[in-house]
Image (cartoon, helix red, strand yellow):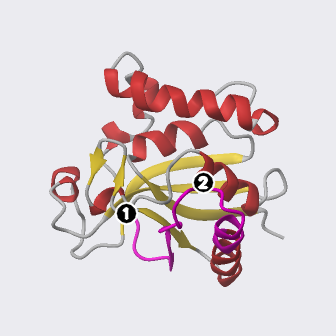
Amino acid sequence: MESIERVVLGGGCFWCLDAVFLRVNGVQSAIPGYMGGTGPNPTYEAVCSGTTGHVEVVEVSFDKSVIDFIHVLQIFFSIHDPTTRDRQGADVGSQYRSVIFTHTTEQLTASKQYIKELDAADTWRAPIVTEVKPLGIFYAAEDYHHQYYEANRSQPYCQYVIDPKIEKLGHSWREFLKATP
């Protein structure tokens, strides 16, 4: 039985998701890319223009014998604001929307159910607007986006936006952290 599962997540800038999920035990890879728009082979510049309909996403491959899908979702929802449509902090546009592209019907069902539970528990002050959709065509981002945080930790965006997410991961999800990123 295959224990590697994949899901594609969008929750703001893909540099953030990439940096966080690469630190999670059981995650085999976190590949930044684009999904959900029109036209083949989108570029960063085209996606950032907001005209292609693509979302900045990260394809997360994880070993479900180490971390299950629900824990992946819990981490995802804890590191971004799923109640803001087409924005995360200062990143504004449909390319930053909150979305889950599922690989299986089980993931689709579990994602929708988890969102219902979060909304019912009034986890946030507003309803969750995260889209849940079946997988589309995934386009890997340009090489310089892969592990961007690791190569650019001194950049202000990394310090002010990504560092707090990694700190939150360390405080809230310590049991899921890899020994080293």
Residue 77, disc: 2
Label 2: element kind:
helix
Q: Quadrant of the N terminus?
A: bottom right
Q: Considering only order in the chain, which callout, 2 or 1, is on the residue closer to the N terminus?
A: 2
In the picture shown, does residue 21 fall above or below 113? above
Q: Position of residue 35 (x, y in %)?
A: 37, 67
| Residue at image location 53% in from the left, 66% down from the top | 128
- For the residue carrying disc 2, how many other residues have a C-alpha within 10 Å: few (<14), some (14-19), or many (20+)? some
Q: Position of residue 70 (x, y in %)?
A: 74, 61
Left or right, 162 with reference to 37: right
Residue 136, quarter of the rendered image:
bottom left
Looking at the picture, tell me which residue is in the foreground, 155 or 181. Answer: 155
| Residue at image location 52% in from the left, 28% down from the top | 164
- Among all residues in the image, which is located at the extreme bottom? 105
Please give the residue where the numbered disc 1 appears in the rendered image.
85
Q: Nearer the viewer, mark 1 or mark 2?
A: 1
Q: Position of residue 157 (x, y in %)?
A: 34, 28
The number of callouts visible is: 2
Residue 94, magenta (yes or no): no
- Among all residues in the image, which is located at the extreme top? 154
Q: Are marks 1 and 2 in contact (CB under 8 Å)?
A: no
**Mark 2 residue type:** Phe
Residue 121, magenta (yes or no): yes
